[in-house]
Amino acid sequence: MEMLRALLSLAAAAVLVNIAMAADYTVGAPSGGWDLSTNLQAWASSHTFHVGDNLIFKYTSNHDVVEVKEADYGPCQASNPIQRYTGGNTVIGLASLGKRYFICGVPGHCDLGMKVEINTLAAASAPPPAATPPPEATPSTPPPATPPPEATPSTPPPASPAPASPVAPVSSPPPVNPPKSAPTTSPPAPSMSPTSIPASSPNVPSAEPPTSSPSPNGSAPPPSFSSAPKANTLVGWALGFCFSMAILLAL
């Protein structure tokens, strides 16, 4: 629709320009007219006629205007006219290209020079009409901008565990040597003097411990003495003690 309006506007502008540029030519003017005294051929050759121009014939009542064909123009034959005009003031529009022929139909006037040949050319080139601005384009709603994709945080690769420093094997503590029991110093053997050694040593009965089953942890339980030989043992200890004391005193 907008394009059609623009074309119609251009056509109307062209018509208006042609109308504005159309010229009206009074035949024989300004020094003469449509009569026997004017050199109409010289007048026609001094003008250029274009499509859209108008010819104005002004004449008296003893004249007329007859448009004829080219074949009748030379011999001034008015018996087969294209159009005949009377009235004294005739306006003829030049609407097409080509030559047109006009004579006076009164006998003898055409032979005396009362005729004219009009050559109509194309319309003069008119200045280009002002350019019609194109219709404003309806702004289309731009599509919503697509947000840029969010940058996905790159997951750092799992850190390789640091190489474990070689752990020195935990050595088991050296076995604790049980404290060495101080060697029991046996009393030096008494000198065997006949005076100090009794004739016979008392016979100390030795009590043999009863055989018992070993304890669960493998260590043999201490020998248990029965109550019967306990008295003998005490006596033996007492004698041994006295014997040792005697040896020490002797030293």
Image: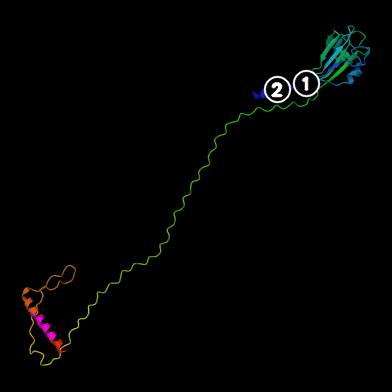
Label 1 packing within 10 angstroms: few (<14), some (14-19), many (20+):
some
Q: In the image, what residue type sits under mark 1?
A: Asn
Q: State the quadrant of the N terminus.
A: top right
**Is-magenta flag for residue 76?**
no
Q: State the quadrant of the C terminus.
A: bottom left
- Residue 154 location in percent, x, y? 48, 49
Q: Quadrant of residue 228?
A: bottom left
Residue that mark 2 sits on: 9
Q: Callout 1: helix, strand or loop?
A: helix
- Residue 150 location in percent, x, y? 50, 43
Residue that mark 1 sits on: 18
Q: Callout 2: helix, strand or loop?
A: helix
Segment tinted magenta in the rendering: 235-245
Q: Quadrant of residue 16?
A: top right
Q: Residue at x 83, y 13 (%)?
A: 91
The secondary structure that dominates the magenta segment is helix
In the figure, 224 relative to 54: above or below?
below
Q: Residue at x 88, y 14 (%)?
A: 73
